[in-house]
Image (cartoon, rainbow, N blue to C red):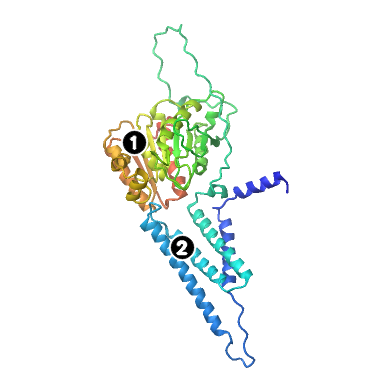
Amino acid sequence: MGPRESHRTINTILLLNIVDGTVVTVLVVASLAMLVYLVSRRMPPRLPDGDVPRNQPLLRRWIGGLGLSALGGAIAAIVTIVICEVVLNLFGTPIELDTHVWVTAAFAAAGIAVFNIWKSRWWRKVIASVAVVLFLVTASLGINASYGLNTTVASLLNIETGHPLALPSRTPLPTPDPIATSTTPPAPPKPLWQSWVAPAGMPATGKFGTVVIPNTASGFVARPAYLYLPPAALVTNPPALPILIMMMGQPGGPDYSSKFLPTLNSMAAVNRGLGAIVLTIDQIGSPTQNPLCIDSAQGNVHTYIMNDVLNYVRNSLHVAVGRTNWAIGGYSNGGECALSFGAQYPGTFGSILDVSGEIGPSLGSPENTLKSGFGGDQSRFDAEQPLNIMARTRYSDMLAIFTSGANDHYYGAEADRAQAAATAAGMTTRRFIGPGVGHRSDAIVYGVPVGLAELYPRWELSAPAG
């Protein structure tokens, strides 16, 4: 196999879809087959007179050992879950039932595999060792598929496979004629949805790919951002368009923005190519860390977003001026960051889209967040809480949209609290709850479209409702 074929094979593996059910089904079948082998032993021979098997005590010990090993593995799973979920509160939200089942089943099966390693032939030791890995991988991919966020192997392993997006050249604005002396006041401009005429040859869909945002001011090491340019942004003389800056959850990355790419293209098709420019940035840097969207030892995320990202948008993208045309949004961890930045900088952002967002910066428990995230500085911890920021500020012409799933009781309650605080502070708020939606990829698939439906009329990309 040559280098080109090897590269193609690696890419095929990295881009393999791991949430559509096929991969997980194959792994579950393989795990069950392996488990059947591990619990099976050749039946001991009977005596010629048909008496009891001569090795029956060994068989009873074998069955008893399997049962105790499976039970030990299940107990270890339960202890692990309790420590992670209750004691350390690593995830900031209760783990759902199917995750409990996956973890418990994997640990119990791994216990059986470990039992097979003890006092067995070398080939059985090898098979049992492979089985441990297989059981854990199957459970990991099963949990990932149930949440539906890491759609490919590359995404799960945090390997960037996105295609760089070449930005269209920006057309300079015309210079006003200094000789013109007309005193007739210009007519007020028509809304974009009324004045826009799609030129011939405009692409039917937008472009989507990665861009690298220079971290000149912050030094924060972020993964490439994902940028969506609607069809109207790809023509020779594009109109200035509104922008939505999005952030995903933790663990997660900007590549999750592919979840709402179909929505962006379908809305552009309905609106004659008009749409928002959507820039999904990386506010965590790695799936294993959470810098809390502040400047800290884990990275100057606040400076990255409010300096580096905003400068990139102003200098590189043809966006409309004015705070009304700028929105900040996010999902889960990103939703909290969006609420925080929107609340702190109403002069920059005129709208907030909070999709199942956290109520405040979180590293699990409030105690751990205070200690690990803020170095024990209570005043700084309090100052960064979005509810506190909104309580000391009065807002005018600020739209805040809060979405969550009907099955997401934890973050749904936090969205209710956030909306109440935003309303009390003078924001115009909208609250949407998706039937049958939880705190998984379905929250993104639900929340972003309903949020954009509220934002498009505000941005004059579509006619006002009614």
Corner quadrant of residue 189: top left
Corner quadrant of residue 4: top right
Residue where numbered disc 1 is placed? 343
Amino acid type for the residue under numbered disc 2 = Val
Query: Is residue 200 visible in this depiction of the protein?
Result: yes
Q: Which mark is residue 290?
A: none
Q: Position of residue 424 (x, y in %)?
A: 27, 39
Q: Position of residue 325 (x, y in %)?
A: 41, 29
In front here: 403 or 30? 30
Query: Is residue 15 visible in this depiction of the protein?
Result: no
Q: Position of residue 317 (x, y in %)?
A: 50, 28
Question: Compared to 324, does 82 lie above or below?
Answer: below
Q: Position of residue 291 (x, y in %)?
A: 41, 42
Residue where numbered disc 2 is placed? 101
Amino acid type for the residue under numbered disc 1 = Ala
Residue found at the far bottom of this picture: 49
Q: Is 37 placed left or right of 298 in the picture?
A: right
What kind of element bears circle 2?
helix
User: Of marks 2 and 1, which one's residue comes earlier in the chain?
Assistant: 2
